[in-house]
Amino acid sequence: MDQRITERLEHLREQIRFHGHRYHVLDDPLIADGEYDALFRELLALEAAHPELAAPDSPSHRVGGPPLESFAPAEHIAPMLSLDNIFDVGEFAVFEDKVRRYLKTDEPLRFVTEPKLDGLAVELVYRQGMLVEGSTRGDGLIGENITAQLKTVAPIPLKLFFGDGSSLVPEELIVRGEVFLPKRVFAQLNQQREQEGEAPFANPRNAAAGSLRQLDPKITARRPLAFYVYGVGNPEALAVCSQEALLIALAGFGFPVNNLINVCRDQQEVYARYQHLLAIRHELDYEIDGMVVKVDDTDLQQRLGATARAPRWAVAWKFPAVQATTVIDAVEFQVGRTGAVTPVAHLRPVEVNGAMVRRATLHNRDEIERKDLRVHDVVLVQRAGDVIPEIVKAIAGQRSGREQPIAFPVQCPECGVPLLAVAGEAVVRCGNRYCPAQSLQKLIHFAGKRGLDLEGLGKKNVEQLVSEGLIRTIPDFFRLDAGRLARLDGWGEKSAQNILAAITARKILSLAQLITAFGIRHVGEVTAALLARHFADLSQLMAASKEQLLQIEGVGEQTAESLAAYFQDQENREMVAQLIDLGIVVRIDASRQAFLDGRVFLFTGTLQTLSREEAKQLVKTHGGQVATSIGQRVTDVVVGDKAGSKKRKAAEMNLALWSEEAFLALINQERTG
């Protein structure tokens, strides 16, 4: 085996570990995303070409392995206990008094406080510094082995990092922490699921748990889960005297530690910290439902021990429930851009944790029936994820008899066309492509944050332009006239010029941006990026058949069918042609262009999967060049069956040799990135 390949693999792994730690844990990257992606792609390609050099701690595990048939049980060496809850300063005083009486001391106690994340508790087992097992909490004694899934969570080190404060790695270290989904990712994930006709997750915790419990680790890998460490299961493995020192040591090993953890010297400081976290909870990009308070001294922790269900040295100080009661005054049925009809409850205005709630989505007919909701019901509402208003349940005991069942329409509330119920889907749809509500929502999406993000063209402005007859189709955005805009109510010359400047600036855009802006059913931002990495330009995507789309890893039956139908539709093709005539330029992603930049490929022998022309086109599409004979400028040689002298010559010149399978793996890793 060429020693250079082994050395290059190890160098790539170390570089990726280092820069991944800088990005995901320290939030202080030293290289651009494109450079990091290039390192990762090279690693994946080399490992595909040399599977015998696989390493258990390789960052390549981040992309996920083959699906599992089920989760094996994982026994915890020490129980993963729950925490007792308290709800006010008086109950904290009782907790502190119990600690003092158990320890028989009046000496000052130091406490460590940390945000109580609303995620999923996990255990990570490291032996000789390598992650060998990861599991859920389960019943506290036995959890589920989700090692493959946890290896895809970027902030979790696969190999312990030798940073400041960590000169010696224990033989075995059992680390515990919380996996969670940031709020912004949760919102994006739910929006994508609703676009694709899937039920949204109820809250970030459910989304995180659902992501980790996917039997296919590749699905977990596509969801950017986060992680904070909070303790260990075998404290004797680390020679530390306090919870604070423990967290410092864990940070030294490469684990992310929450920056809101604080040391408090007395009860007053603990209470002040609780008030601070309560005040800022909605500013954080992750869910917290309280504050954990721990006795800082680890010797005292050992002396205090635990009851059957909870440690005596820690307690969860919970925040007040963010809920309120109100009344459903009416239910409106809204039609989205894909034709999905969504029931929305109009509520009697009620304040929920500082925000006035007037509306809440009911999602679909199944949700209404499951919760047995009726018009005029008294209901319990909350801000799901502390952001999205949600009806928790009806308070049936307060029904007066005037409540009315929520009748789902059989015809589109906007155009009157009969609604369609599709087998396997919870939503019903309007199948009329000319439905005015669908057309309006498509235009709002195209101009909005999830589309081209045309500054100054929010929902109300788009509605105004449609009502004035200035916009009817997507290309009309690029036909707007400054003079007519300036004469609209509430507009002027300056606002008109600003909007036209924003539109002009979006005439040059990426393929992923354009695909996302079209608002194609089952195609969200993640899928759009996947397609943009696969196809060289828009024309290639438009020409792709359903069968060709299904060959792309990550594109399923529904998505392939939706894409093929969208671009085979004559009106959509004409719309794209109009955009191009109006000066739209779709740029190829720079990292995609540069993927094979500077590399020259030679093909020799008979290829089994590709024609020679197809293989050459793949190289050119990714920025590489193709040679027909061995020479000094050739860098890579792809070897097919019955390869002859060119293969021998390439070996003599120490050129990189690729089988057809390895070459395809190289290209596919770039496409799925």
Image (tube, rainbow, N blue to C red):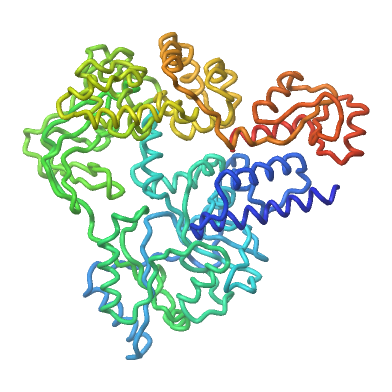
The quadrant of the rendering that contains the C terminus is top right
Which residue appears farthest toward the top when viewing the image?
570
User: Vertically, is 484 above or below 8?
Assistant: above
Residue in the picture at 47% in, 15% down: 565
Residue in the picture at 55% in, 58% down: 22
The answer to whether any part of residue 522 appears in the image is yes
Residue nearest the viewer, comparing 11 with 82: 11
User: Vertically, is 384 above or below 607?
Assistant: below
Q: Where is residue 590 shown, x and y percent of the image?
A: 57, 35
Q: Quadrant of residue 329?
A: top left
Q: Where is residue 104 shown, x and y percent of the image?
A: 35, 90
Left or right for 503, reference 157: left
Residue nearest the viewer, comparing 27 with 368: 27
Q: Where is residue 455 shown, x and y percent of the image?
A: 31, 34
Q: Where is residue 18 shown, x and y percent of the image?
A: 61, 58
The answer to whether any part of residue 314 appears in the image is no
Residue nearest the viewer, comparing 446 with 143: 446
Q: What is the tally of numbered marks visible in this picture?
A: 0
Q: Quadrant of residue 541?
A: top right
